[in-house]
Amino acid sequence: MSGMSILSVKLSVRLRRAAARMRAEQNRASAIIEFALIAPVFFILLLGIVENGLIYFAGSTLQYATDNAARYIRTGQASSASMTQTQFRNMICGDISPLLACNSNLQIDVQAYTSYSNASYSTPTDSSGNLKTSLNNFQIGSACSVVLVRSFYVWHVITPVLSPFLTNMTTGNHLITATAAFRNEPFTSAVSGC
């Protein structure tokens, strides 16, 4: 082989390698651009999924706290200990504390009735879609009373774009509710059965 043909073979090999390298770099650059276009949508969807899971977990936590506190009313422990509204609220706050803040976003409404047919309750939101501040009743009733314990928590939705799918209040928030309805046990000796 002549020196010229060896040189041309080496040059063509180098050119092919350079072309392959340029194609690989071009593919990497297009992958970066494609990821930059898709990443915001992906991360918003991921944030929405995480927040939706947190809302359901918060609802489960609030229901557990409401059921746990309602048990003190149902068994007469709240009546015998002369439990106050603040103590009852603190009991619920103790069960929800790491996940939900115990502030004005939490409303607890306890009402007693003589029977299930006499039970009546109002909606938790006003005409503007805000949580009513009047939901602060604390009537635990007596033995054999029907009691309705309702807890409400206003969750501030933070996911952009998907907030219409995560909110259930006109204010752009999500109202988490928990309810316990029961008849008090006959916890006094004066009442033999309900």
Image: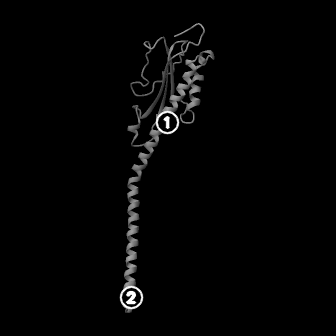
> Which residue is the extreme one toward the bottom?
2
Residue 104 percent across, percent down from the top left: 52, 29
Mark 2 = which residue? 6
Q: Amino acid at mark 1?
A: Phe
Look at the picture and state if 12 lies above or below 109.
below
Q: Residues within 10 Å of mark 1 (few under 14, many from 20)?
A: few
Look at the picture and state if 175 lies above or below 40.
above
Helix, strand or loop status at disc 1: helix
Residue 125 percent across, percent down from the top left: 42, 25
Residue that appears at 44% across and 39% down: 52
Residue 44 percent across, percent down from the top left: 42, 46
- Residue 99: tell me if it is visible: yes
Residue that appears at 37% across and 90% down: 4
> Which residue is the extreme one toward the right?
81
Mark 1 = which residue? 57
Task: Report the coloring of the rendering.
Answer: one colour
Residue 183 percent across, percent down from the top left: 51, 16
Residue that appears at 43% across and 49% down: 43
Helix, strand or loop status at disc 2: helix
- Residue 104: tell me if it is visible: no
User: Is 4 in front, or is 104?
Assistant: 4
CA separation in Å, label 1 and label 2: 72 Å
Residue that appears at 57% across and 36% down: 98
Marks 1 and 2 close (CB-CB < 8 Å): no
Q: Amino acid at mark 2?
A: Ile
> Which residue is the extreme one toward the front?
193
